Image (tube, helix red, strand yellow):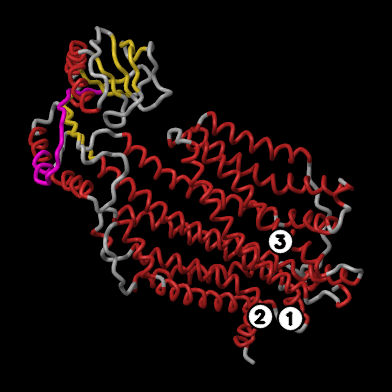
Amino acid sequence: MSFRQFAFNNVKRNRRAYSAYFLSSSFAVMIFFAYALFIFHPELANSSLGNQAKIGMEAAAYVTFVFSFLFVLYSISAFLKIRNKEFGLLTILGAQRSQINKLIFIENILIGFASIVTGILGGLLFAKLFLLYGSSIVETELSLYLPLKAMGITIAAFSALYIVISFLSLFFIRQKKVLELLMGTSKPKKEPKAHILLVLLSILLIVTAYYLLNQNFNMLLLALPLGIIGTYFFFTQFSVYVMRLLKKNRSFFWKGTRMLWISEMAYKIKDNARMFFMITIVTAMASVAIGLVQSFDYVGKDSYKDLPFAITLDATKEYKNWETDMQKIDQELEHSGIKYDKVIAKSATIQMDDRSSVSVTNESSYRQMAKLLGLKASYNLKSGEAIYISPNKQGIQVGQKVSKYQIVEQINKRITGYLPLLVVNDEAYQQIQASLAKENDLSSTGISVYYSVPAWSGKEPPRSDSDQVKISKTIQKNVTNEEGFLSTRAGDYMEFKHSTSLLSFICIFIAAVFSLATASFLYFKLYTDLNQDQRIYHMLSKVGLSIKEMRRTSTIQIAMLFFIPLIVAGLEALISLQILNKGILGHLPIWDMMTPSLISISGFAVVQLIYFLIVRVLYLKQLGHVMVKSGK
């Protein structure tokens, strides 16, 4: 038997351990290939979202590749750890260190080659489904094609990855002596300890991180590392301390099989603390990303419903051809048989005392807008008085001053664009115009044309194939408006929706890679401990431990390994999303924010539950083989 055949047979013999690693690696290759398939599609360049899609997918491909590197590196270290005894025996039988290194290198290359081939074949198998989903996002028909470039990049990238990993894996055993290798995972473990100061520090860091973020969102760069460090100490110190407290509680600890699984979990939590930490951070970040992207969809829908005018044309005083643009809009609406009303209003932009901007219009223009919108139209404002209109209920209130104007009426509604609107009497508006003209700031004054289209109620967002969207896109295409701003409610919403759909598309696939990898991490860790657990349960079965008790004890331990990081990640994600809602999204209703958050976390929970049930069956089957007959 040649050395290569020996390496190949080694992989076959350890297929139970390599199967999860192989499948997870193949899945990572498949996702990377699918991204490349999308990025290099020849028809994507013709899409309006082509560049955005490419940038987003390239970023996702980089994230997938980096995570795949870390995942493969961790997996290799886990495999080599459980095979230490095998390497020790080979050394005693005369194998040189260079031969063992060669064996490890060949095995890694074999697994890597098989993963690349399987991943690309899987990607080709599901390519049509992937392109169909991508087509719905960029709204461009993406036909199936022969992705030679995508295949070449995938093969080159992952071949380089496995070669580098194969060399790095040699460092995991080169410093170990023969006795260490022979002992394998059988070395006695020290009693896990927790320092009370670090336990308190973990709680303090996590609480401080969320407090800083809640008080001032600009503290994100400080709060994020504090939260990460706090989470690390939570698993390495706090969780061990909790297990110690449970062991001291005699009435709880000495009941049934609790003594067995609590004693074991005290060691396993300490051993797996870093893995728990990594899984928690990755899961929390993925859940936050998905929840945040889905929340953006609610923001887009609310913004669409809040805008009362279907089309808005803003032109600065410097722009002389605004009437031509207005006529183009009129002609397109009339040609399409759409009834409409419009208001031509004077507009200006000034800065308030806090340096934020506000739109200003005169009372005459506002009367016309209010009439179309069914609002109170007559106020007879005096000099120095103003109406403040904004959807933000926590904004300026009646009696306050904006610039030098006393607010006599505050309306919680969005009327013009995204800036608050200040309505002053006609004489005051002329003074504002004169002041801006004196400062030679012609870009801050101009004309705004607002179109109200009864057929486009704005109660519900339109579909991408609706007449409203098609006409809006035609208007946006025909009206250049070089010195102003054209906004169509439906067109702006569809652009926003496409962007969030693309982000959601990217986040979901990255989350899929993360989810599968985290489950694989747990499987590898359990497999690493399998031999030791088999020895323990074999001895316990001799003194009366039944198979039923073994199953219950092992199930509790496996469940804690799978779900403790998920529960912590879920809590961190929910809290983070609520703070992000306050800092970024502008106070969405609590249910609108909680829904996508709970959906994303529930998705992870369902996937983890499936993995848990599969791993539990496989693991209990292996433990059942070592239970003595009398233990049944």
Q: Nearer the viewer, residue 93 or 206?
A: 206
**Upstream in the sequence, badge 1 or badge 2?**
1
Name which residue lies at 56% across and 45% down.
573
- What label does residue 558 carry, if any? 3
Q: Are marks 3 and 2 in contact (CB under 8 Å)?
A: no
Q: Quadrant of the C terminus?
A: bottom right
The label number, if any, that marks residue 90 in the structure image: 1
Q: Are marks 1 and 2 in contact (CB under 8 Å)?
A: yes
Q: Residues within 10 Å of mark 2 (few under 14, many from 20)?
A: some
Left or right of residue 223: residue 538: right
Q: Residue at x 57, y 66 (%)?
A: 72
Q: Residue at x 38, y 49 (%)?
A: 500
Q: Amino acid at mark 1?
A: Leu
The verdict on residue 341 being magenta is yes
Query: Can you name the residue that lies furthest to the right here?
Result: 543
State whether residue 137 is above or below residue 80: above
Determine crowd level at label 1: few under 14, some 14-19, many 20+ residues with C-alpha closer than 10 A.
some
Whole-number angstrom distance, CA of label 1 to CA of label 3 = 33 Å
267 shown above or below 7? above
Residue bearing the label numbered 2: 99
In the image: residue 359, left or right of residue 278: left
Q: Position of residue 93 (x, y in %)?
A: 76, 84
Q: Magenta span has 610?
A: no
